[in-house]
Image (cartoon, helix red, strand yellow):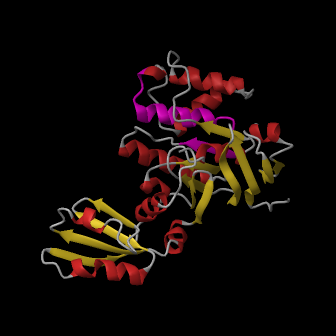
Amino acid sequence: MNAGNDIAIDVKGLTKSFGGREVVHDLSMQVKRGSIYGFLGPNGSGKTTTIRILCGLLTPDSGEGTCLGYDILKDAEKIKRQVGYMTQRFSLYQDLSVRENLEFVARLYGLADARGAARDMIRRLGLSGREEQLAGELSGGWKQRLALGACTLPNPQLLLLDEPTAGVDPKARRDFWNEIHALAADGLTVLVSTHYMDEAERCHEIAYIAYGHLLAHGTVDEVIAKSALTTYTVTGELNGLAAELAGKPGIDMVAPFGTSLHVSGRDVAALEASIAPWRERSGLHWQTSHPSLEDVFIELMNRSTDNFQ
């Protein structure tokens, strides 16, 4: 299969099993070059396995496709040379300084001017003044920034981020994402798995994967629209309301959001019939609202079947 120059990843029918359990099922998708593609889904649902298959780090049991113009089955080694991979766990040397870590990585990849490459990366990521600080003494946000610098030093065409901002404060997360968007604007393609809805909304496109099955994909607006959810936001005296509504015909999701309750369903008639008795209850205010990405995420989780149980 031949992907166009504007397509970084083009795969069809990918399937992968471990120990007799299917963790990726008949997956087909395309990722545009220079885009940030987000993967959402429950823990253990196959997100990381999917990402690794897409870029040739794992061989699928069946299916075909290309990554960066290379065949994922035949050219895995060529693909790997073009990939930067940032895992959840900080994997650089804790007892080396920021500069020493970056210079080591630059030499590992055979860059002609290791010191110059490290110096430029330190400047780009705002690490100036911390060059000689030991990596192990950095805060979570600075470690994350250093790890990003290390995996982008060799100028990869594809960047894999596996829940990269877990345990990082909101400002560091925002700074990180600003840098990711700057890299994508320069042509880098980014695959990222995340549980944060605000991060998913920063992606150009997203895919929802549950236990190996691709359930939804597209832009955030497209995924929300395709969910066909009708959502009500309920405020007021909510004590016990969630338990009363849960499981009623047409009600696919009941979830608290701060001082309000979101009640959603895909069958509008059944939803309206089920909530009718509570619409007249004093002390409750019902208002139609646009479903959020989190509403869609929760609803998809509720109807996903865990194939490991």
Q: Is residue 88 above or below residue 276?
A: above
Residue 278 appears left or right of 228: left
Residue 97 appears left or right of 277: right
Q: Position of residue 2 (x, y in %)?
A: 85, 60
Seen at 25% across and 71% down, the residue is 234
The one of 229 and 246 positioned closer to us in this rendering: 246
Furthest-top residue in this view:
95
Q: Is residue 185 visible?
A: no
| Residue 214 occupies quadrant | bottom right
Seen at 72% across and 28% down, the residue is 109
Q: Position of residue 203 (x, y in %)?
A: 54, 58
Residue 129 appears left or right of 246: right
Q: Position of residue 67 (x, y in %)?
A: 76, 50
| Residue 92 occupies quadrant | top right
The one of 89 and 106 positioned closer to us in this rendering: 89
Q: Is residue 171 above or below residue 303?
A: above
Seen at 43% across and 51% down, the residue is 196
Seen at 87% across and 43% down, the residue is 74
Q: Is residue 115 visible?
A: yes
| Residue 295 occupies quadrant | bottom left
Range of magenta residues: 137-162
User: Does residue 2 belong to the magenta stretch?
Assistant: no
The one of 164 and 129 positioned closer to us in this rendering: 164
Q: Is residue 182 above or below residue 125?
A: below
Placement of the N terminus among the 4 image quadrants:
bottom right
User: Does residue 140 belong to the magenta stretch?
Assistant: yes
